[in-house]
Each structure stands twice: as structure tokens, then as C-alpha cells.
Amino acid sequence: MGGPQRLQKLIARAGLASRRKAEELILAGRVTVNGRVAALGDVATEEDDVRVDGRPLRTPARHVTYLLNKPRGYVTTASDERGRPTVMDLVPDVPGLHPVGRLDLDSEGLLLLTTDGDLTLRLTHPRYAHEKEYRVWTDPPHVPDHALARLCRGVALSDGPAVAVRAERAEGGAVVVLREGRKRQVRRMFAAVGHEVVRLVRTRVASLELGDLPPGGFRELTAEEAAALAAAGPLV
């Protein structure tokens, strides 16, 4: 039997949302504990009647995490008000499954989906700064050394400076590694050095690589892969 825990942690462990998203649910009055509307800072045990939008919280016997090769043309949301296909259409219908971070509509490649809210927090919180590697095709296709060097020194974007961990020339474009994931960041960084991104594929997140998984294909992480992600500490 589990002892008292913060509500957002219980909700995250149930796979309904990340801890930060769970806090938003609590603040919105959508969480109750034993019939009482919960407040941020409340604690509960797994034996309490915790409900989100009236539905009882159920901690799964085990969490599941999928690695998906996201194709172009899919949005990274659970549903889309404009009726566009979502990444959830490509994976099994597992309660609590949600995307970890996002890839925009026109981007492709490695995307994780999990029922584990704690893992979501660990992979998306800035203090952990996991590396993300992208294969980029550009127009013009030749990215000169001075442009690659600028990416590594840092470029000014509308929401603050952005710096690549590594940037190397590749056929038709480049390979770039970042430790953050702001909206359309790779595209904006290359635009800042005079290159339009015409195709973008994320090939690695932390220790996980896309490999030869076909577009639209997915696989479940092994226990060893999931443990390695869970054990990764923050940058100091």
C-alpha cells in the first residue's frame, strides 16, 4: 500500500498527464479526492477515491512507452479540432497514453508516447536537457562552415538565443543536435543562417535512436531502454 503522495504525482503515475499538466487539472477544479474538489498541494494515497473529470484514477499494473517513427502530416496531439490525423491513430489505444513533447505537422521521426507521467516530466523538463538529434535537408542544400559555426555559437530568435550542441554538414543539408525543444526551433535556427528547412527528421532522443523503423511504425521500449531513460539525471 502506498503512503500519501502529492496528487499531481498520483495522476502522473496513472499515466493521465505529466505532473505539470496534472497541476493544471487540479487548479481547474477537475480533480476530486473522496468527493471533495482538490486543491494544489493536497495529498492522497492509492486507497483514496481520486477522480479526474469524475473518472476514478486507476494506476496501471505497468507503464508502457512506445517509440514511433512519426510521418509527415500527423499532428502531435491526442485529438485535433480540425480533423487532421494525429499520432494517436498510429499506436494502440492504451488508456493514459500521451505524446512526450511534440514534432510539428511537417516534421518526421522519433516520437515517444507513454503512460508514465514521471517519464514525460523527465524527458521534457529543461533541467534534464536531453539531447535531440535531427537530420535536416535545406534550401539551398549546401550549408557552409560559417553557418554551422554560427549555429554552435548561437543565433538570436524571437523567444531568445538558441545554441546547437553540434552541427555538421550532411548531403543536402546538415545534422544538428540540440538540448532544448522550442516550437519550430530547428527551422527557425536554420532560417537565421539563411537556409530554409525543406525536410526534418528527428533521429535520436537521449540514448534512443530511430534506427530502421519505417514511417508510421512503432515499437515498445525494452525494459532496459525505459530504465536508462528513467535513471538519467539532470545536468549540473
Image: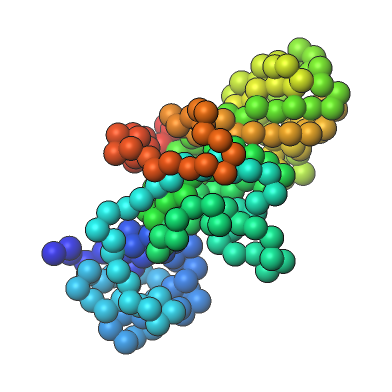
User: In the rendered image, which quarter is residue 52 located in?
Assistant: bottom left
User: In the rendered image, which quarter is residue 32 located in?
Assistant: bottom left
Where residue 175 appears, as percent x and y from the top left, is 65, 22
Q: Is residue 85 left or right of residue 99?
A: right
Where residue 14 appears, as percent x and y from the top left, is 33, 62
Instruction: Please state which of residues 79 and 153 is positioned toward the viewer in this rendering.
Output: 79
In the rendered image, the quadrant that contains the N terminus is bottom left
Residue beneath the point at 76% across and 37% down: 188
Instruction: Please state which of residues 85 and 7 is positioned toward the viewer in this rendering.
Output: 85
In the rendered image, the quadrant that contains the C terminus is top left
Q: Judge whether residue 161 can be spotted in this image.
A: no
Question: In the picture shown, does residue 110 fall above or below 27?
Answer: above
Residue beneath the point at 70% across and 49% down: 73
Question: In the picture shown, does residue 236 fall above or below 47?
Answer: above
Question: In the picture shown, does residue 205 fall above or below 58?
Answer: above
Question: In the picture shown, does residue 11 fall above or below 214?
Answer: below
Residue beneath the point at 78% across and 33% down: 197
